[in-house]
Image (tube, rainbow, N blue to C red):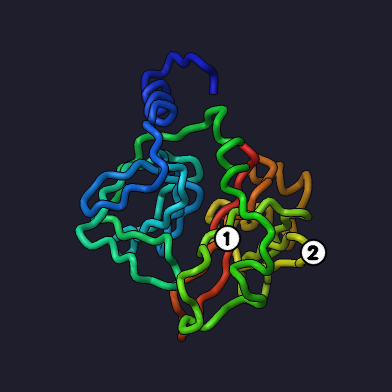
Amino acid sequence: MPLFSRDPAVRAIKQLVEGMVHHPTVDLSPNSTMFGLVLGSTNETTTVMDLASHTIVRWRIPWPVGVETDLVTFDVVEGQLAGDIERNDLAQPEAVTIAELPRRLGSYRGRHIRHWLEELATPADGPLFGFRGPSAPYWELRGERPSVALIAADRGPQLLRRHDDGSTWVRFGWFGDDVWLVCEDSHAIRTMEATRRSSLAGKDLATSLGFRPAYVLTTLSRPVDGHCYKSCTGLLPRG
């Protein structure tokens, strides 16, 4: 994004994001307003970086039945926390409840994004989310580990499409592990559908996505039949 833009809306977003007063911790006061930078969004969860504290937060948004999320990576959004933010989910300790649909203010592509993503990247600390395999029993989770991991992949990522059920998967290497996750990133899924290919990697993947993916946003789901599952909810550029 150029330092000076003729578009007043772009300038306003830049001033909002870069002029945000920094706080050491995220403000989770009930009914307060939070400004976030979207890292990934599905109807179950929207992962944002709180612009005031640069902390990852998961928003539970009350999408109406039949309405799909329209939030995309690096959107700047304004959300009002609910009176009861429901900070009691041991599987998703970063999750808070938003009172109503958030307001999309614009998108940010400023020079700070690369630095922020580097700071948010998950360090190596054993297997993803502390356990191997695709899922863990909900009753074994204690809220001691994050349910979001921004992974700087050692290898890949690679997108694969399974023809038997039409699902899209992300494969990447991370500190010696060969990780396969179901993909819930709508842009990546549409990319696979448009190319009609069973696999995309390297330059082909970058060309199809419109950027070179440097990070894999991974999240832990709500319980499904008593288990919480790992998934990819976003592919992100380096900045």
Q: Secondary structure at mark 1?
A: strand
As drawn, is 195 to the left or to the right of 90? Answer: right
Check the image and report above or below for 178 versus 139.
above
Q: Residue at point 42% right, 60% down? A: 94
Q: Closest to the observer: 105 or 54? A: 54
Residue 158, quarter of picture: bottom right
Instruction: Determine if residue 63 is in view.
Output: no
Nearest the viewer among 123 and 96 is 123
Q: Is 171 rendered above or below residue 153?
A: below
Identify the residue under disc 1: 218
Q: Residues within 10 Å of mark 1 (few under 14, many from 20)?
A: many
Give the foreground label among 1 and 2: 2
| Three-letter amino acid code at the position of disc 2 | Gly
Q: Residue at x 42, y 42 (%)?
A: 24
Quarter holding the C terminus is: top right
Query: In which quarter of the view is residue 237 placed?
Result: top right
Across and down, in percent, residue 42 comes to 45, 59
- Mark 1: which amino acid? Thr
Image x and y of residue 19, in percent? 39, 26
In percent of width and height, residue 17 lies at: 42, 31
For the question of whether residue 58 can be seen, the reply is yes
Q: Residue at x 42, y 65 (%)?
A: 93
Question: Of label 1 and label 2, which has the lower sequence position?
Answer: 2
196 or 188: nearer the viewer: 188
Q: Which residue is mark 2?
A: 176
Residue 53: which quarter of the image?
top left
| Residue at (42, 57) in percent of width and height | 58
Total marks shown come to 2
**Residue that extends furthest to the front in the rendered view of this protein:** 24
